[in-house]
Amino acid sequence: MPFLLNAMGVEPRHNYTAVIYVQIGAALGPNAALYKLVRTITKSQFVDRILVLWAADRPLPLKKRWPPTYHIPLHVIALGGSSRGAAASPTAQTGQEGRPSISQRFLPYEEIQTDAVLSLDEDAILNTDELDFAYTVWRDFPERIVGYPARAHFWDDSKNAWGYTSKWTNYYSIVLTGAAFYHRYYNYLYTNWLSLLLLKTVQQSSNCEDILMNLLVSHVTRKPPIKVTQRKGYKDRETGRSPWNDPDHFIQRQSCLNTFAAVFGYMPLIRSNLRMDPMLYRDPVSNLRKKYRQIELVGS
């Protein structure tokens, strides 16, 4: 179990598997967010392989359309129950009308051979230094979710219910799995241990799987996730069909949060105001002295 590694003096295995979940499936070309993301990951010094989970309605791109990954293996899996062709996972959960469930992004795929999983949405816009820095932080905290986009929960007295916010506050309790590292053990727990009612809530809404993963990890560890650097936005704004643009998306997430808390019997999420930055970050010294120079160029 990852939360026992530090106590036993055991380090997680080196390198990580990048898992990219594709819902939109925009045309793949040099200017596409997914194309640029794969190219960025390939430059990381710690990546072991790249796994693309294709859940879009569009057909899989031809092999020649993908960017070259050189010595980094690239696996593309068309998730089951749709018109995307072969290579579906035999253990895949499917949603309504045979469509893939968004929880399939957390299945324990056999292609994942590393302890570290880098979970990414197809329109994430992190640079290579951001990936490498987040991975080095995760290695010190392998039992936690470590990543970039932070969110928070709160108790709303006026509604007598839990609230969910994406506003920039002085604390957070969720790190979204659209750009985050976690231990692959949590894929097993998510798939095989969580209540079917929780998984059904995610399946019916096609939403909230990232919130549920955060509740699971905090429930198991009784620790909060860890946010790295000052970055707030992490998505390519030119991707117009993103589910995040749906006005009902936020309302669904509020509802999910309360359903999850009711099933768990309490609120597992834990608040934190900790943020991890590289050494000499924003310090007035030569950029040549800094290890993660690209991070200095990222706006909030």
Image (spheres, rainbow, N blue to C red):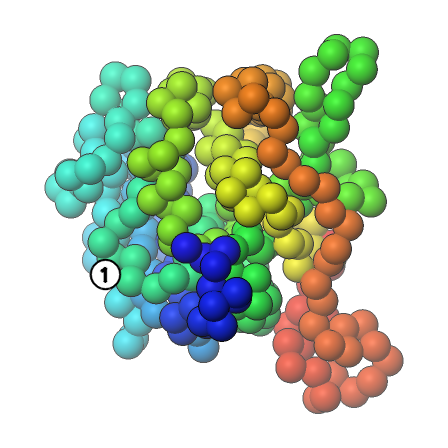
- Regarding residue 149, the answer to whether it shows in the image is no
Name the residue: 39% across, 25% down.
Answer: 195
User: Looking at the rendering, which quadrant does residue 104 occupy?
Assistant: top left
Front residue of this view, candidates 276 and 41:
276
User: Looking at the rendering, which quadrant does residue 105 occupy?
Assistant: top left
The residue that mark 1 highlights is: 64
- Kindly give the residue lying farthest to the front in the view shown: 8
Name the residue: 73% across, 47% down.
Answer: 272
- Regarding residue 216, the answer to whether it shows in the image is yes
Q: Position of residue 62 (x, y in %)?
A: 21, 53
Q: Position of residue 161 (x, y in %)?
A: 70, 15
Q: Is residue 101 above or below residue 272?
A: above
Q: Is residue 41 above or below residue 300?
A: below
- Kindly give the residue lying farthest to the right in the view shown: 284
Q: Position of residue 45 (x, y in %)?
A: 45, 77
Q: Amino acid at mark 1?
A: Lys
Picture quarter with the N terminus: bottom left
